[in-house]
Amino acid sequence: MIDRRIKFRHIQCFVEIYREKSFKLAAEKLFLTQPAISKTLKELEDILGTTLLIRNRAGVALTRQGEVFLHFAEMSLAALQQGLSGVEHIDARGRTKLSVGALPSVAARLMPTVATEFSELASTTSLRIIDGPHGYLMERLRIGELDLVIGRLGHPDTMQGVTFTQLYEERVEFVVRAGHPLLDGPDLKRIADWPVIYPPEGSAIRPLVDRLLIAHGVGDLENQLESVSGAFGRVFTRRSDAIWIISAGVVANEIADGHLVALPFDTTITRGPVGLMHRPDDVLSPQARVFSLAVNNAIKTLRLIPVEEHF
């Protein structure tokens, strides 16, 4: 039997402290003071009669008991969010709703075709599309604000508690404006001569790009600007001599239109799977299953390469 002294706030505080690896950041996220969140954790540990988290140089770490409790605490929060979402799953017009997160690598190239396919297959379902960076969408998926996320496979640490189904593969491109001086003599080692828009820490492609540059002996980029914003990258690259390092899907339309040009570098090492993600404990709704069908139809329409063809 559950101890009635354990409240929702206890579980929420514990989970957020672990996710943020910081009492301060967790307090800010929950709009609480740091003393308040520390007190709430202490109450929970007193009720359970054990220590769940310990502070260290990295921020916080789970104890063995904390590891066990975290698994069920996250499941509890996700289940509650699913319940709330279920109440709101029918809109005022009686239409069902499906919320999908799209990473930048698929938002520009794949999602317009998917949305068209989905509207034809599920005309009574309202589709809500949220784009954003990997970490943001994964968090929204875990807590139940999103039903599905589609995009690149992230670092193992960011994929905990998420099921990933591979769809196709995508690589990183180095793109510039038409007429860029580097097009006259493409050389990867010369990119340091110009401003470089680089994927930030935490982005799915960052470790792949780091590995590529190390493999080609490219040192530190002094004139480096970190961003995965498609809106910013498209405008800044066309208006300057910047070199934009970004997933191919983000710039596929601009390359096809001739507004941007992909430098002829071998970026095979950056190739990685793009897939559909959901919570592992979820039974996919009929709407989610139809969306998956729409995604597969869109992949065929756009002639994207399925992952298995490379093995």
Image: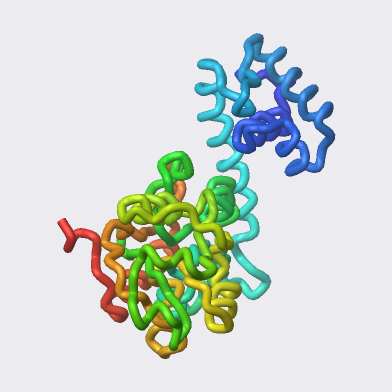
The percent coordinates of residue 194 (x first, y second) are 51, 70
Residue occupying the point 48% across, 71% down: 243
The percent coordinates of residue 115 (x first, y second) are 46, 77
Residue lying at the far bottom of the rendered structure: 257
Residue occupying the point 35% across, 75% down: 263
For the C terminus, the image quarter is bottom left
The percent coordinates of residue 19 (x first, y second) are 60, 36
**Toward the viewer: 90 or 154?**
154
Residue 7 position by quadrant:
top right
Q: Is residue 91 left or right of residue 102?
A: right
- Asked if residue 248 can be seen in this view, the reply is yes
**Toward the viewer: 21 or 244?**
244
**Toward the viewer: 40 or 192?**
192
For the N terminus, the image quarter is top right
Residue lying at the far top of the rendered structure: 49
Residue occupying the point 67% across, 18% down: 3
Q: In this view, does 55 lie to the left or right of 250?
A: right
- Asked if residue 120 can be seen in this view, the reply is no
Residue occupying the point 47% across, 58% down: 149
Q: Is residue 287 above or below residue 261?
A: above
Q: Is residue 267 above or below residue 4?
A: below
